Amino acid sequence: MPTPKSLRLVIARNVSATFNIIRMLSILLVFAFAGCGANLEPGWKAYQRGEYDVALDRWTPQAEQGDSGAQFFVGLMHERGQGVPQSYEQAAYWYRLSAEQGFAPAQNNLGLLYYKGRGVEQDREQAITWYQRAYKQGNVSARTNMAMIRISAEPAAVDYAKARNMFSRSARDGDAAAQFALGMMYRHGEGVEQNHSKAAKWLKMAAAQGHARAASELGAMYERGEGVVEVHAKAVKLYRYAAVQGLPEAQNNLGLMYAEGKGVDQDLNEARTWFAKAAAQGTTSAEYSLGKLYLQGRGATHDEQQGVQKVQLAAQRNFAPAQHLMGLLHTKGQGVAQSPRQAAQWYEKAAEQDFSPSQNNLALMYMQGTGVKQDYEQARRWSLRAAEKGLAESQYMQGWIYYKGLGVPVDQKEAAKWFTLAAEQGFAQAQTNLGLMYLKGEGVPQSDKQAAEWLTQASDQGRALAQTNLAMLYAKGRGVRRDLTESARLFASAAEQGQPLAQSKLALMYEYGRGVERDPVAAYTWYTISAEQGDAQAQARVESLARGLTPQQIAQARQNAGTWTASHEQTEQLATVPLPPVEQD
């Protein structure tokens, strides 16, 4: 969502040119009101048919004879390059001749050229002068443009009440640019109380008149369900309408809808087409999305070189998600040389723009001393910025920093606070650590029930350490009902993931038939696997259990253990910070 400053720029870019092509049908009525005596209708009919040479041949002699309406039309054709080479200078020349005779539409359009610096030196005061002349004659577009001038001023000088009043009057008179501006004010709560329903009302009116940006903004509202019922198919229709008119932001958004399969069947080739159109107009986010498709080989031939080139271009334009992706590429060595130092530099660029995933990854690099000098204070500072914005990985990191006292005094209460925030978002490592803190009464009141609840949530996500501790609670009936079958199931799941304590406990259950059928071979197998990972109790039990087994049983158990070891890697013993970098889809 745009900041107030960017919102003013969005509105200001949509200044209203009198007789916009999509509203041409009203032109003769305006001429009649202006009291124009010349017969412009033959030229107008030719213009409607797209016979611009004929129209120009009809209007040029009338313009040269001083007809203000014809002068306006000739200026319009030069501005648009219809029947003549496009020339803002010639447009300004003919508009001025008409404007000086008091023709309001020409006064408005001449003001617009001064406002944008097209064909004349940019001059805000001259723009205001010509707008005011047209405005005094009741020109609706000029009234809108005067309001645009007010809304685009420096924040301290913005007169929102006056601008809103002028926009409202022009919007009620049917001016699409004013309807768009009013809708944007309500959508973002700029100068008015935010009201998405009113925003949708005005944007619908502007879009119905063919206003491309209004259609695009309304599409975003349908996509998100802001002030209207969320209907992705409707969003696609509106994005497409604006995209076909060449609006790059709509082209980019339409590409995203196709990429994600929202409101349309997923079609990555179609997504690539629209991203390419938007990228060709300099839309950085589309360049980034196009690069991702090439990197992933989705909707395009897999081309890492092309993908990196496009993502890097977006990153160099200071687009934070692209900078973050460049960091990930250098972390993995995908399409570029693996370089933790380069990764850290890209993460820092995005982090300084307040991009949370990069702040987290930069903090992780400072925590581990990867690509940068290890610095716990920098790790805490960057992860705190992301944690305060709600990123669960960074909230977890903050908890670990305080739990272990990394660059700060140990503070179990502060650790529990951050673990809780991450755990409530479903972050399994935090749920595990919080469960263990409740089990031990560290930073929180000791509670087997609370411990079991958090360990269950982490266990359901497959966390081996959580499953191991929860299994022991079930074995003892602490915080949960005593259930040896459930205990054995949890030990088995953790054991398969390589958790040595779970392997030893599962072996014990097989040895004595607790929660499972007694199976000395299975017991010897799991003791052997656990012992090989350094579990002292398991090493002692292997020797004791061997006395009651036949050589064939021992051989079978050792073969089973060897097979398991060959296909598994040892799991982490603690829910510690070393995590993969946060990726941004």
Image (cartoon, rainbow, N blue to C red):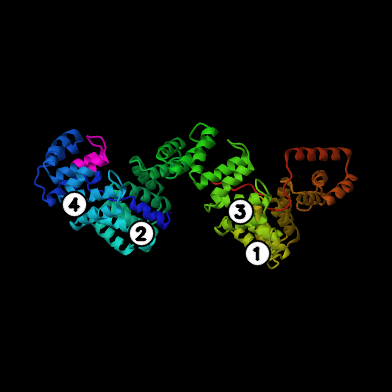
560 with respect to 460 (left or right): right
Amino acid type at circle 4 is Ala
Residue plotted at (20% across, 55% down): 133
Coordinates of residue 114 in the picture (x, y in percent)? 28, 49
| Quarter of the image where one finds residue 486 | bottom right
Helix, strand or loop at label 4? It is: helix
Amino acid type at circle 3 is Glu
Coordinates of residue 290 in the picture (x, y in percent)? 47, 38
* Residue annotated with mark 4: 104
* Residue annotated with mark 3: 393
Question: Mark 1, mark 4: which one is toward the viewer?
Answer: 4
* Residue annotated with mark 1: 414
Q: Is 283 a magenta residue? A: no
* Residue annotated with mark 2: 186
| Residues at marks 4 and 2, CA–CA distance in whole angstroms | 30 Å
Amino acid type at circle 1 is Glu
Q: Is 77 a magenta residue? A: yes
Relative to 304, residue 450 above or below = below
